[in-house]
Image: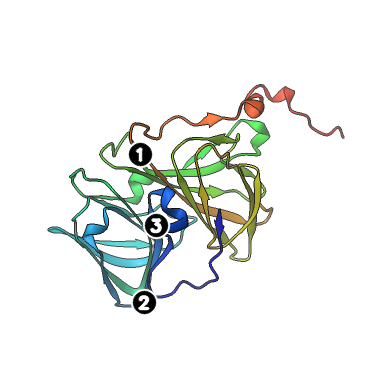
Amino acid sequence: MQFHHKPPFNRGLTILSPRSGATADMLMDFGVLKLGSGESYTNNPKAGEQIWLLSSGEAVLSWEENKAAVKRPDLFDHSPWCLSVPVNCGVSIEAGAAGAEFYYCATENHRQFKPKLYSPEECQSEFRGEGTLRETSTRIVRTVFDDTNRPESNLVIGEVIGVPGKWSSYPPHHHPQPEIYHYRFLPEQGFGLTAIGNTPYIIRDKDTVLIRDGEDHPQVTAPGYAMWYLWVIRHLEGSRYGPQYVTEEHRWVSGPEEHIWQPKR
C-alpha cells in the first residue's frame, strides 16, 4: 500500500499512517511533526511507546528531568538524533530559529524502560553490499536501534540512503513483521521504483509505503538522484524481528559474481 503526500507538510503533527482503520494491522501510528521558528509541541504520553527522530532543523527536547539541544542540517550527509521513550513519558519539543521536522512513531508497549536519546555517533553510516553484485546494490544503512541495543522496545528503526542508480533492500527478502518505509529524494523531484510483493510502485518525495507479512520489498533509485528512506518495523508478540528471509528464487545472486551475466565489449 502506498500513500502520496503533496508537499509541504502542514505545521504541527500529521499522522501519515494511523493505528486504526485500513492501516490498523501495521500496529503503529506514523507521522511527521513540522515546527516553525520558536514553535513548540507537547506529546500525548498515553499514546504508547514513542519515537521522535529529527529529520532536519534544530530543537530542544525535554523529557522527565532531561533536556538536550539537537541539530541536523540534512538527511543525506548527517546521521539522526532519535529519542525513544516508553508509554506515559512526556516529551516537549521547542524548535530553534531554523524550525524543525521530526518523524514520529508510536505503538502499544506496556513495558516500562528508561528513555534514551540516540546521538548521531551511535547511528553511524555503514556501506552494505560492497564487493557484491558488481556494486549494483551498494547503499548506506544507519540502524538507530534494534534488539541488540533496545530489546525492551517493540520497534526497530533506521535509515537507508539509496545511491543513484543502485538497488537497496536487495536481494529481495521478506519477514512477518509489519514495516513502514518513508521516502525523501535529493533533488526533491527525484524518484525510484519498488515492488511490494507483486505490486510495482513509482516512489517520490514524501511517499509512504506499507509492507505486510511475507511481502518482498526491493528498491531501486533512479540514476542522478539519491533516495533516503526511513524504515520502522513493529515486533510481533512471540515473533521479534531478526532474520530476513531471502526469496529462494533470488538467493543465487548472493553467490559468485562470475555467474552474473555482463555485456561483452
Can residue 55 be seen?
Answer: no
Answer with mark 1 or mark 2, whichever residue precedes in sequence: 2
Answer with mark 2 or mark 3, whichever residue precedes in sequence: 3
Query: Which image quarter: residue 259?
Result: top right
* Residue found at x 22% / y 59%: 45
Can residue 119 be seen?
Answer: yes
Query: Which image quarter: residue 188?
Result: bottom right
Quarter of the image with the C terminus in it: top right
Query: In front here: 159 or 86?
Result: 86
Marks 1/3: CA–CA distance:
25 Å
Q: Point out residue 150 in the picture as x, y percentages from the top left corner.
A: 29, 39
- Measured along the vertical axis of the image, is residue 93 above or below residue 191? below
Disc 3 element = loop
> Which label was assigned to residue 36?
2
In the image, what residue type sits under mark 3? Ser
Q: Point out residue 133 in the picture as x, y percentages from the top left corner.
A: 66, 32
Query: In front here: 198 or 112?
Result: 198
* Residue found at x 49% / y 35%: 175
In the image, what residue type sits under mark 2? Gly
Q: Nearer the viewer, mark 1 or mark 2?
A: 1
In the picture as drawn, the residue positioned furthest to the right comes out as 265
Residue pointed to by mark 3: 20
- Measured along the vertical axis of the image, is residue 249 above or below residue 36? above
Q: Which of marks 2 and 3 is in front?
A: 3
In the image, what residue type sits under mark 1? Asp
> Which label was assigned to residue 146?
1
